[in-house]
């Protein structure tokens, strides 16, 4: 809250400066010698050399500006990227606010949706909803005929206007889940689990076969239950929307949470769960998984091939597995993210909105995540981007493209091309992507609810207190120092005193106000 107040004070001091952007034009080469694809009805170029500054986060310590030169050619604008590390993004934004030099596009460092809307109401940002007539691509993706037009309610500020530009189609279908040693299962004739009980029996069998092992390991720390909660139909450390009851409920006092706690307590007591589940660092956890001290875990699908390459065990084969909980479901990842971008309110706002609309087009998505056909990529026989300028056989990562071409810099793209490297899966990763269609196991996504006014602080305060206390309760319950019905009832009473009922009330009230 103190950071937000500081930002607000800084904004109030510099708005008069930010609203009077000086005429700053640069000669831009609009003679395109490359194809730019479908702009979705947006006419380009639309600029006349005006300088547009974009702030984004770069973790490569020297991302190329190649792609921004191409973006300038296409739009007729002089697009200047201001690329900073994630770790210093918030501090950088505060400095820029204090200096009166707020960039035109801010894709990092401002904060979450509530903070963005709070600052917007003070006059910091231009309203997207005031420029829709100039944004055919945004209208197509988020307009009244779109499945995602709820953003105009869920993400709007108190004045009813939308200020945030969400990232579209960033998520894969599957990014996280259960990982298991298929080679060990095949060796001993073990079958895939399909319920908590069959999972438990599988762990017991592995413990019998490998007495020195802890079959299930974790590096999630206090977030252990968050990884498994989806398949129980709840969300650890949070509220969840009960589709049957059509109401928000608090997960950590739900009877399903007690089932989870009892389940993991049993795994811990029988030495089926790594006793260091709360303290494992990534290197320690990796060593256990790669060396065969543990056989099952929950993590990112990129580990599937990574661990195979790191292990010296002959035939080591890590694969994607079923969820553990009774619902046998995984999280439905959102197609859009409200951790998006905002446009500064100044003399460049209209042009900047057109720039952002271009980034929502097919051509914009291609440019910022694949590049220019014939210069940075070609399309292979599978319809995927084959990137140029790298050694043959190298697996191209997002950081490679940022460093060499300036693509994939967070805050400078709003849409992702599905042909890009992020969606170019290995055999193991593709199995994970195919799992939801094969098993029909996606948990419905919760509605998006944002808060305004005093409710923002109250929700944050209650949620923080509850999470801090439940972290302590969770650990004591699983390791057995405070477990069973008495411990559970004690926690439920503590949660009420900390405001769990009030938190649910606020969510249900806001849900109704938004008409979701």
Image (cartoon, grey):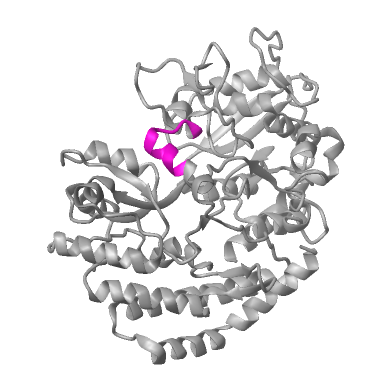
Q: Is residue 293 above or below residue 254?
A: above
Of residues 417 and 52, the one nearer the viewer is 417
- Decide if residue 286 is on the left or right side of residue 122: left
- The percent coordinates of residue 120 (x first, y second) are 74, 53
Quadrant of the rendered image containing residue 273: bottom left
Quadrant of the rendered image containing residue 397: top left
Of residues 64 and 228, the one nearer the viewer is 228
Which residue occupies 63% across, 68% down?
Answer: 241
Of residues 234 and 42, the one nearer the viewer is 234
The quarter of the rendered structure image containing the N terminus is bottom right
Residue 155 visible? The answer is yes
The quarter of the rendered structure image containing the C terminus is bottom right
Q: Is residue 349 above or below residue 118?
A: above
- Decide if residue 199 is on the left or right side of residue 332: left
Q: Is residue 368 above or below residue 453?
A: above
Quadrant of the rendered image containing residue 193: bottom left
- The percent coordinates of residue 369 (x first, y second) are 55, 28
Magenta stretch: give its range.
423-433
């Amino acid at each position: 809250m103190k950071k937000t107040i500081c930002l607000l004070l800084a904004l109030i001091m510099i708005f008069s400066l930010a609203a009077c952007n000086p005429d700053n034009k640069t000669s831009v080469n609009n003679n395109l010698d490359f194809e730019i694809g479908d702009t979705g009805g947006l006419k380009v170029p639309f600029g006349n050399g005006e300088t547009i500054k974009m702030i984004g986060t770069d973790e490569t310590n020297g991302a190329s500006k190649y792609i921004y030169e191409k973006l300038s050619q296409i739009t007729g604008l002089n697009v200047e990227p201001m690329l900073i590390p994630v770790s210093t993004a918030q501090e950088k934004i505060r400095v820029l606010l204090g200096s009166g030099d707020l960039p035109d596009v801010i894709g990092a460092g401002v904060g979450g949706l509530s903070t963005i809307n709070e600052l917007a109401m003070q006059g910091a940002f231009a309203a997207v909803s005031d420029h829709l007539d100039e944004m055919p691509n945004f209208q197509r993706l988020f307009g009244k005929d779109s499945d995602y037009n709820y953003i105009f309610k869920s993400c709007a500020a108190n004045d009813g206007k939308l200020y945030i530009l969400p990232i579209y189609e960033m998520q894969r279908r599957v990014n996280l889940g259960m990982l298991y040693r298929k080679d060990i299962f095949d060796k001993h004739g073990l079958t895939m689990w399909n319920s908590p009980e069959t999972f438990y029996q599988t762990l017991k069998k592995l413990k019998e076969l490998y007495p020195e092992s802890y079959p299930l390991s974790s590096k999630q720390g206090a977030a252990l239950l968050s990884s498994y909660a989806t398949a129980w139909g709840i969300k650890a450390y949070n509220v969840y929307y009960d589709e049957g009851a059509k109401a928000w409920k608090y997960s950590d006092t739900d009877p399903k949470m007690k089932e989870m706690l009892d389940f993991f307590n049993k795994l811990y007591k029988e030495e089926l769960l790594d006793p260091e589940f709360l303290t494992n660092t990534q290197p320690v956890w990796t060593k256990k998984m790669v060396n065969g001290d543990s056989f099952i875990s929950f993590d990112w699908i990129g580990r599937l091939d990574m661990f195979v390459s790191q292990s010296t065990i002959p035939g080591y084969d890590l694969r994607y597995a079923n969820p553990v909980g009774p619902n046998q479901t995984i999280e439905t990842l959102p197609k859009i993210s409200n951790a998006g971008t905002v446009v500064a309110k100044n003399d460049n706002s209209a042009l900047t909105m057109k720039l952002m609309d271009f980034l929502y087009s097919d051509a914009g998505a291609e440019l910022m995540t694949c590049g220019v056909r014939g210069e940075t990529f070609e399309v292979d026989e599978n319809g995927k981007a084959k990137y140029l300028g790298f050694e043959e056989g190298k697996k191209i990562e997002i950081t490679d493209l940022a460093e060499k071409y300036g693509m994939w810099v967070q805050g400078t793209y709003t849409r992702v091309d599905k042909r890009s490297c992020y969606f170019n899966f290995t055999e193991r990763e593709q199995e994970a992507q195919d799992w939801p269609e094969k098993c029909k196991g996606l948990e419905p996504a919760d509605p998006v609810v944002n808060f305004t006014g005093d409710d923002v602080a109250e929700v944050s305060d209650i949620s923080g207190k509850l999470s801090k206390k439940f972290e302590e309760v969770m650990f004591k319950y699983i390791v057995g120092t405070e477990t069973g019905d008495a411990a559970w009832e004690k926690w439920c009473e503590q949660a009420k005193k900390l405001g769990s009922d009030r938190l649910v009330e606020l969510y249900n009230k806001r849900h109704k106000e938004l008409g979701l």
